[in-house]
Amino acid sequence: MPFYVSPEQIIKDKADYARKGIARGRSVVVVQYSGGIAFVAENPSRALHKVSEIYDRIAFAAVGKYNEFENLRVAGVRLADMRGYSYDRRDVTCRGLANAYAQTLGTIFTENNKPYEVEMVVAEVGDSADDDQMYRLTFDGSVADEHGFVAMGGQSDQIATALTERYTEHLELDAAVTLAVSVLAEQGAPEPRTLESAQLEVAVLDRARPGARKFRRITADRLATILSDPS
Amino acid sequence: MEWSAAVGSGALPSSFMTPGTSSFSDFLGATAPQMLPGARSLPAGQVEAPHGTTIVSATFPGGVIMAGDRRATMGNVIAQRDIEKVFPADEFSCVGIAGTAGLAVEVVRLFQVELEHYEKIEGAQLSLDGKANRLATLIRNNLPMAMQGLAVVPLFAGFDLESGIGRIFSYDVTGGRYEEHSFHAVGSGSMFARGSLKKLYGPELSEADTVAVCVEALYDAADDDSATGGPDLARKIYPVVLVVTTDGVRRVPETEIGAIVNSVVQARLARPDGPTGLRST
């Protein structure tokens, strides 16, 4: 047992640990479409969610260890509601949340013995596609401003490559969901597999939804209809 | 898991990350109590604050209606002539407030966030009784201010998805919660409104007729209570009327209310004390 471990080694060990944990889990794809932003997660559980509403136009998706990203989700909802209550609903922004998450994840990574095995996206839908925002946050608190699509968890590199080839802007919702589900199904397993709606969790931030709250879950029935449509 | 929030780290405090309460007001009480309306300690004294109101609520087959007048008074002065006192609390319920206007609006805001917060954290809506109980707690927390003369008294109504009917709840300043049946009114003009509703209301009236009955009741309240405002036909300021059914909360649009108000006023020109009996459905 060495007396001294270099800081680089400590950080590298933590980072490897977190990456391994995230790669072990199932994947989530976040995709911009014509009407907003779609979140497609491989998730066989009906009770435990990987994709959730944070505020009117802001949603959260994560991969990794459930109890860790659940803590982050609850913290985000609390922060958003506090800001919206003390200022105004319009003053709650995705950027502000992403900053708070980055600081939190960074502090946890540096100061905890065990980093959070979590990778997450916070996204905000705007009045037009140009105003949509997506931020990807990794276990060490890095933030990246993303466009078009984000793939997290599992074989995320493979999924990202497949999406780079096949994704186009301004897809309709059905096409975007079908694309996301097919890239999720292809990755990993040597034999082709199909993902049924019971194995998926899909939600959208729908620009056109009446009212302030734009988050909406796609029901299993609706999802089955989208997936069974051959076109 | 405790981690030290290093000075200047900017990270969210661990209290944000700790699972536990799904209640927004409890969370504020633990982490930022100064943000709660009732939590401030006040020096003794009187302050002039806007008051006054009548709020009425009545059930009909398929839902419930809540209507409120538009006047806020400060002593003998009309502080505001178009204040809104009836708000949707969430998708299937609404709340109307009587008492100190500024505090009451803050309590409603807190209540709206409370309900939304619970739904987002838990992934499910509160039951209607649960919502009514949370409002009672918020009012109870305002008791110290109420005893200084800054009281807030709400009327809460919603559509109960489990039983499929509209339900009404009234409160007193201590946070006591009472379920009312058929109809109820709160505020300085509530006695007159209730007298009017007693004669005009029927449990089988249609939604449109129940709205009209509520408008009549507000008119009668304004007729006898100076702190309740009647309809302002010149400025087109009409009562706020919300309808809650299985389809959610709907605000009756101004054109529709205007038409109802105008027909009520026209009838009063002929008979100033109002209609003599139940409307025919």
Image (cartoon, rainbow, N blue to C red):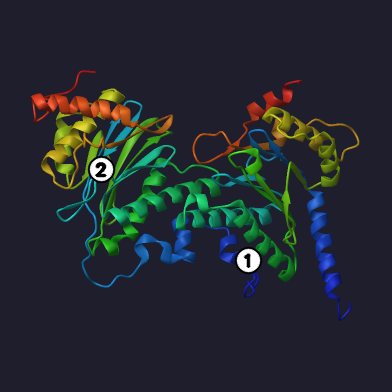
Q: Name the residue beneath numbered marker 2.
A: B70
Amino acid type, label 2: Arg
**Spot occupied by residue A9 in the image (x, y as percentages of width and height):** 86, 70
Tally of marks: 2
Q: If the image is split into quadrants, where does the N terminus of chain A sit?
A: bottom right
Q: Position of residue B66 (x, y in %)?
A: 30, 37
Residue A49 visible, this angle: no
Residue reaching furthest to the bottom: A3
Q: Residues within 10 Å of mark 1 (few under 14, many from 20)?
A: some
Q: Is any atom of residue A201 visible in this view?
A: yes
Chain name for mark 2: B
Is residue A129 rendered to the left or right of residue B76?
right
Placement of A172 over or under B143, stated as above or below: above
**Residue that protrudes farthest toward the front in the picture:** B234
Asked which quadrant contains residue B214, the reply is top left
Q: Are marks 1 and 2 in contact (CB under 8 Å)?
A: no
Task: Give me the residue at 31% from left, 25% from top.
Answer: B207
Q: CA distance from mark 1 to mark 2?
A: 45 Å
